[in-house]
Image (spheres, rainbow, N blue to C red):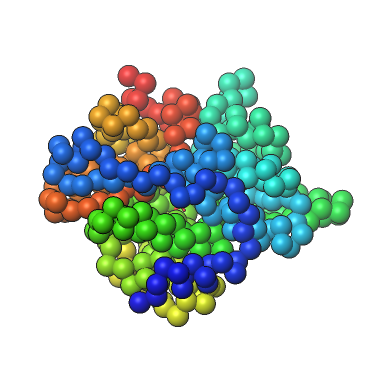
Amino acid sequence: MKSYVEVKNKLAVMKKVTLGFFPTPLHKLERLSKEYGVNIFIKRDDFTGISLFGGNKIRKLEYVLGDAISQGCDTVFTYGATQSNHAMQTATAACKCGLNPVLFLVSLVEVNEEDIRSNLLLDTILGAEIHIVPANGQLLGDANKRSFDLAKERMRELEKDGHKCYDIPPGGASIIGSCAFIEGFIEMNEQMNALSIHPDYIFTATGTGGTMAGLVAGKAALESDISIVGIIVGPKPDDYADQIADLAAKALQHIAVDKTADTSLFTLDRNYFSPGYEMPNEDANNVIKELAGKEGIFTDPVYSGKAFSGMMDYIKNGKVPAGSNVVFWHTGGTTALFAEQEIIGSLAK
Ligand SMILES: *Cc1c(COP(=O)(O)O)cnc(C)c1O
């Protein structure tokens, strides 16, 4: 088994910029733990900074923008839905680093130009160059592919004018971005060690898979026996687990840790996102209200609320045994609470 220090030293050779406030807090949910007979801890990556609206992408962006700057780039491109947390965090991080953010955003929910909300509002305030790409009934993944083509054209124009562009994939789910969650995995373990508590489970929301890939790579690097459960937040291809395992293996290779990763290291669950990505789920909305009402913590209807709802279901039906130590990895996203009615559904009632 590799020690924390060994793996941290491997990460330390990567280019990195400081964006957020780390370590993010980790604390116990006292009331819910007592009520459900499981020790529930929460890892507050909703508090990464740099603004009030942080989230899991800030971790990745420390490494991704470190790479962009080391290559001499002055402009960063990225992709997502119009209310993409990743796009907003990329724009925020780019501004801090003096880079120009260019966003290609698919409108799954129609944009009302007269009433710009939530992350799209923040992107606008940040001064990002925003291109809206109509979804035309396509899923996000398919519409993203059209964004890539449009972005290539824009990149050519900017490069003709002397700019150097860096392309960040949706969710920042690159090999470099995923390495940040190896670091995050160590950070969480150190916090649990300080409490003298052995964590049995991590639950988190999984979208592009970069966060899961990094956590899984961390588990492999440290030969941890923790169970990692990713709650899927939208339709995914059949080989989604293989993609995550592949990204985890490549992240380990990237930092020259002599370990590999495969799909036996984690669990994915598709049962909690219906009816679709960015579409409210009644059970999730009830759990969002329960968590807020009992612990004063907000999760969102697109990612963290669905993931928390999945975790609570595992706890209620005994899939997580009584007395287990469970870490919910809060990935942020709460700006969605201020998004369009189509996204928040029954939360306003
Ligand atoms: C992007 C995002 C996720 C998913 O992370 P991935 O690395 O894309 O799988 C989860 N929660 C929130 C709030 C996010 O913005």
The quadrant in which residue 37 appears is top left
Q: Is residue 101 above or below residue 222?
A: above
Q: Residue at x 46, y 50 (%)?
A: 23
Residue 243 visible in the picture = no
State the image coordinates of residue 75 (x, y, percent, origin top left).
74, 50
Q: Is residue 331 left or right of residue 13?
A: left
Q: Is residue 167 left or right of residue 135?
A: right
Q: Residue at x 75, y 56 (%)?
A: 73
Q: Residue at x 23, y 38 (%)?
A: 30
Q: Is residue 226 above or below residue 107?
A: below
Residue 154 visible in the picture = yes
Q: Number of callouts in the render?
A: 0
State the image coordinates of residue 347 (x, y, percent, origin top left).
35, 25
Image quadrant in which the C terminus is located: top left
Q: Is residue 225 above or below residue 115?
A: below
Q: Residue at x 66, y 61 (%)?
A: 67
State the image coordinates of residue 169 (x, y, percent, origin top left).
58, 56
State the image coordinates of residue 198 (x, y, percent, origin top left).
25, 59
Q: Is residue 297 left or right of residue 48?
A: left
- Furthest residue toward right: 161
Q: Nearer the viewer, residue 211 or 277?
A: 211
Image quadrant in which the N terminus is located: bottom left
Q: Nearer the viewer, residue 308 or 160?
A: 308
